[in-house]
Amino acid sequence: MSAEKVQYIRVAEALAAEGLIRPADALPLKPALDALPVAISPEVHLQIKASNHDPAMLKQYVPSTEETVIAPHERADPIGDVAHAPMKGIIHRYQDRVLLNLLKTCAVYCRFCFRRDFVGKGEDTLTLAETDAALDYIAADQDLWEVILSGGDPMILSPRRLSHVAARLADMPHIRILRLHTKVPLVAPERITDELMNALTSSGKTIYIGLHINHPAELSPNAMDAIKRLNDAGISLISQTVLLKDVNDNSAILAELFRKLVEHRVKPYYLHHPDLVRGTGHFRVDLATGQRIVNELRGNLSGLCQPTYMLDLPGGFGKVPIGASYIKQNEDGCLMVKDIQGAWHIYNG
């Protein structure tokens, strides 16, 4: 069955018609859909079917009434983007890199999205004038080395629009790296065309694709073909995964995912601790659980497959690695180092 023969799912009634929710649940889901729309692409629908409706796949994309439960400590802007937005389209948190957010629309909407209060609201992409103003900001800052296209999902933009950005960046010698954060190769692989890849590589910059992926079932044959096309075009791929309760909070699931990614020339980059996003408490694991899972991976998985376990501090204070420490001092002041079996050893180096 091809993805082209399946329609996008965008309303609760369609979720019920496809057996993804009970018909009686359609009306109670309206508040959740008002907060963040549903968008399940044909490819994701096929992946869900191929997984036999694995709850790990359903939970990522199918809305739940649990999303209307908002805890006091949860935030609309959990990582403090607004505090680092000097102008429309720009988020500048770190000295040598900047986010260029060209749009607030995605090919699909992940129910745990850390920008769920900003995306999918019907807002259009940046105008050409707004895009050029943001690019002027980048051109003026000689300390910048990397531009990261985010959003929204930049790879749903037309090749023409991406070519315009690439052409502007080509005239900025201080920008050496162009990175795009996306789920498109996984959820809409038909969009990975020669025209799109030519648009990206026309900048003359080193291109990295940051692939957002959380479960092995997302690596469908169509998705793996899209990944291969990107790799064969000379584009490097890394992955970002969010640690999610009842989706991938299991070292065996993550090991399978990370090995498959490396086998397909995608380097696992970050394993994100879930952000304090409003209405996502049902996705959140605690830090102790995350550290235990990462320790299990450390002892049993090739270093090629090891991402860095990261926490984006609330309030805009940046990313911090939060893997368990392997170093301590004993009562005599000697340095102790823990091995992968959990035993401590004195180190005199």
Image (cartoon, rainbow, N blue to C red):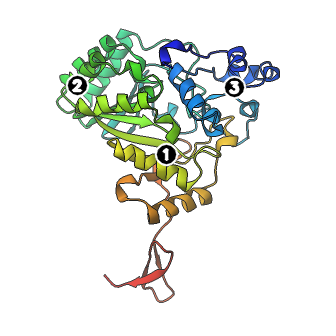
Q: Name the residue rendered at 50%, 57% in the picture.
A: 322
Which of 217 and 200 lies nearest the eye of the viewer?
A: 217
Q: Which residue is mark 3?
A: 20
Q: Is residue 268 visible?
A: yes
Q: Is residue 336 left or right of residue 10?
A: left
Say which residue appears at 75% left-offset and 19% top-offset. 30
**Residue furthest to the front:** 1
Task: Identify the amino acid type marked 1.
Answer: Phe
SS under mark 2: helix
Is 275 on the left or on the right of 278, as rendered? Answer: left
**Residue 164: where, in percent of width, then height?**
27, 14
State the image coordinates of residue 6 (x, y, percent, origin top left).
55, 15
Residue at mark 2 to residue at mark 3: CA–CA distance = 39 Å
Up/down of 261 relative to 4, above or below: below
Which residue does the numbered mark 2 point to in the structure image? Answer: 201
Q: Is 194 in front, or is 87?
A: 194
Calculate the distance from the C-alpha at mark 1 to the C-alpha at mark 3. 38 Å
Residue at x 24% of width, y 23% of height = 169
User: Mark 2, mark 3: which one is toward the viewer?
Assistant: 3
In which quadrant of the rendered image does the C terminus lie?
bottom left
Which type of secondary structure does the marked residue at label 1 adopt?
A: loop
The amino acid sitting under disc 3 is Leu
Count every numbered label the image shows and give the total. 3
C-beta proximity under 8 Å, tags 1 and 3: no
Q: Which mark is residue 105?
A: none
- Whether residue 310 can be seen here: no
What residue is pinned by disc 1? 317
Label 3: how many residues lie within 10 Å, few (<14), some (14-19) or many (20+)?
A: some
Residue drawn where x is 31% and y is 17% of the image: 162
